[in-house]
Every structure is written in structure tokens, then in C-alpha cells.
């Protein structure tokens, strides 16, 4: 069974002001763990926590399912993690 949590309608309206998640959108985690990817498979109203990006590509140019599989590919995952390591390394250097 999936965990379900609910927010009341007023909270939903105040939090969800743009980029309203729609069925088929691609979800991407930005940390802990980085680069988990999923595709929204419901048309119910949903709210996501911080550190989750809802990707809504322009449909005529990029199919959402293709984007999901691209982000899940070994090549893309490797590149994402390399970039993240480089950023962490830069951030941990002492300022001169």
C-alpha cells in the first residue's frame, strides 16, 4: 500500500500556484537520493515536497515518457552524478 498524506484545500491552493502536476509529468529528485525519476500516473491533485522537480516539457517537441527513460538511462544518470560530485567538490573548497 502506498503512503498517503493529505493537505486541506486552502493549503493546496496557497502552495500550488504554478506548475500544477498533471498526469504524465516527469518527477525528478534533486537530493537524497539524487536523480530518482518517476512519471505521474494519476490525474488526482497532488502536492510534492521540496527537492522534487515536476518536469513538464513542451509536448510537440519532447515526449514526457521519452524524457523519463532518457533521465533513467545509464548515460544520463552518470552525467547527473558527475555534475553533482563536481558541485559538491567546489562547494567544499575553502575560500581563498
Image (spheres, helix red, strand yellow):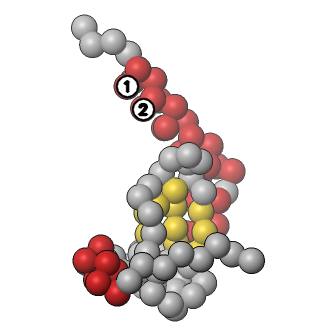
In this rendering, is residue 41 above or below 30? below
Q: Are marks 2 and 1 in contact (CB under 8 Å)?
A: yes
Q: Residue at the location (59% across, 48% down)?
A: 33
For label 1, the residue is 91
Packing grade of label 1 (10 A; few <14, some 14-19, many >=20) is: few
Report the residue marked by disc 2. 87
SS at circle 1: helix
Q: Is 3 left, or right, of 51 in this rendering?
A: right
Q: Nearer the viewer, residue 76 or 25?
A: 25
Closest to the observer, 11 or 76:
11
Q: Quadrant of the N terminus?
A: bottom right
Does the rendering let one see residue 48?
Answer: yes
Left or right of 95, for residue 8: right
Residue 34 placement (x, y as % from top left): 55, 48
Q: In what quadrant of the picture does the C terminus appear?
A: top left
Q: Residue furthest top?
A: 96
**Residue at 64%, 73% in the rendered image:** 3
SS for callout 2 = helix
Which residue is pictured at 29% across the width and 84% down the height? 10
Amino acid at each position: 500500500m502506498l503512503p498517503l498524506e493529505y493537505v486541506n484545500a486552502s493549503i493546496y491552493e496557497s502552495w500550488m500556484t504554478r506548475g500544477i502536476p498533471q498526469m504524465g509529468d516527469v518527477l525528478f529528485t534533486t537530493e537524497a537520493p539524487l536523480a530518482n525519476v518517476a512519471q505521474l500516473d494519476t490525474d488526482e491533485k497532488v502536492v510534492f515536497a521540496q527537492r522534487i522537480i515536476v518536469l513538464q516539457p513542451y509536448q510537440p517537441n519532447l515526449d514526457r515518457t521519452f524524457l523519463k527513460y532518457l533521465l533513467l538511462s545509464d548515460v544520463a544518470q552518470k552525467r547527473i552524478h558527475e555534475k553533482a560530485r563536481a558541485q559538491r567538490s567546489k562547494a567544499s573548497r575553502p575560500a581563498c
